[in-house]
């Protein structure tokens, strides 16, 4: 019961604040999070810590983190500017299947907020087996430092795509090849001409955007309300290379 507590103590000891949000310290946060989910041991959290599941307050001691899950795939982002992380988890072979996206935010070097979108049977185009198949074959390699996009470029690419749902005139930085993984549906065919410009619904505002940006992999995850305030809990994750969209991963909670 000490997984997250151990990190909290080490983070506090890692003063000054700049050390508390180093890339390596955030990697430890995501490693501890994945271990917590594997073992079903969320660790003790203070009463001030915010914990939500599908954008609703939840009890961490009885939530998804308290259930040991066999994780088939995970990948994380580490945002040293915001002291935040994002982790995608795929559980395709257990008694229950899940695709989970979790944003974690730190305050003064301590885990302060944990927000998870938990998708399973009944959610949008859910197919954990398909998600695992496609996600595990993608290459989200570390981009050489001289070729990395700025945070502003990465976020602008995400915003343009999300704005397109409510404004068809938006100029989106489409790239080729690009593949979109939406639930278990995949647009990529392994061709150099693959595009993510395959159509989106219209008249759908996507609001309350919360970003985690990792320039080392050209990626931003956004937690959003899909279809206006109070809409469906949704995660859209984007990878850009040289300012152009390369991968998009989405998950949308539909059961509530």
Image (spheres, rainbow, N blue to C red):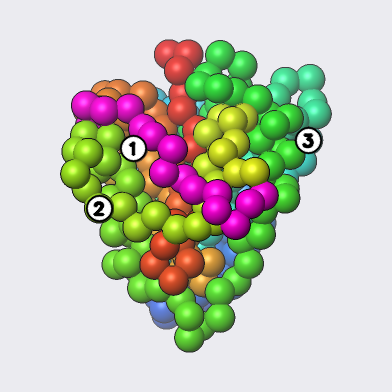
Residue 174 placement: quadrant = bottom left
Residue named by callout 2: 171
Queried whether the magenta region covers residue 199, the answer comes back as yes
| Residue that numbered label 1 is attached to | 224
Q: Position of residue 137 (x, y in %)?
A: 72, 50
On screen, residue 223 versus residue 87, left or right, reads: left
Residue under the point 74% across and 39% down = 133
Q: Earlier in the sequence, mark 3 or mark 1?
A: 3
Which numbered mark, 2 or 1, is in the foreground of this view?
2
Q: CA distance from mark 2 to mark 1?
A: 20 Å
Instruction: Judge left or right: residue 71 versus residue 248.
Output: right
Residue 50 seen in the figure: no
Quadrant of res 27: bottom right
Residue pictured at 48% horizontal, 67% vertical: 241
The rendered magenta stretch, by its main secondary structure, is classed as loop
Task: Tell me if mark 3 has few (under 14), some (14-19) or many (20+) residues whose alpha carbon lies within 10 angstroms of its own.
Answer: some
Q: Tell me which numbered mark, 3 or 2, is placed earlier along the sequence.
A: 3
Disc 3 designates what residue? Answer: 70
Q: Alpha carbon of mark 3 to alpha carbon of mark 1: how far?
A: 27 Å
Question: Helix, strand, or loop for circle 2?
Answer: loop
For label 1, the SS is strand
Disc 1 residue crowd, few under 14, some 14–19, many 20+, Cα 10 Å: many
Residue at image x 51%, y 71%?
216
Which is more toward the observer, 183 or 105?
183
């Amino acid at each position: 019961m000490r997984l997250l507590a151990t990190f909290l103590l080490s983070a506090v000891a890692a003063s000054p604040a700049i050390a508390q949000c180093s890339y390596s310290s955030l990697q430890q946060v995501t490693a501890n999070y994945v271990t917590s989910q594997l073992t079903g041991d969320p660790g003790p959290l203070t009463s001030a810590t915010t914990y939500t599941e599908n954008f609703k307050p939840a009890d961490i001691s009885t939530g998804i983190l308290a259930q040991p899950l066999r994780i088939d795939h995970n990948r994380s982002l580490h945002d040293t500017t915001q002291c935040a992380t994002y982790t995608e988890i795929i559980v395709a072979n257990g008694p229950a299947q899940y695709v989970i996206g979790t944003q974690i935010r730190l305050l003064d070097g301590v885990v302060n907020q944990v927000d998870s979108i938990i998708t399973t049977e009944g959610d949008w185009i859910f197919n954990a087996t398909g998600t695992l198949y496609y996600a595990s074959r993608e290459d989200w390699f570390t981009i050489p430092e001289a070729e990395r996009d700025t945070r502003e470029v990465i976020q602008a690419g995400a915003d343009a795509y999300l704005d397109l749902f409510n404004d068809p005139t938006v100029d989106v930085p489409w790239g080729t090849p690009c593949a979109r993984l939406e639930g278990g549906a995949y647009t990529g065919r392994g061709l150099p001409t693959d595009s993510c410009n395959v159509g989106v619904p219209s008249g759908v505002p996507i609001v309350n955007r919360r970003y985690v940006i990792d320039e080392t992999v050209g990626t931003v995850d956004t937690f959003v309300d899909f279809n206006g305030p109070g809409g469906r809990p949704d995660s859209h994750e984007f990878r850009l290379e040289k300012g152009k969209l390369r991968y998009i991963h989405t998950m949308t909670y539909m059961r509530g």
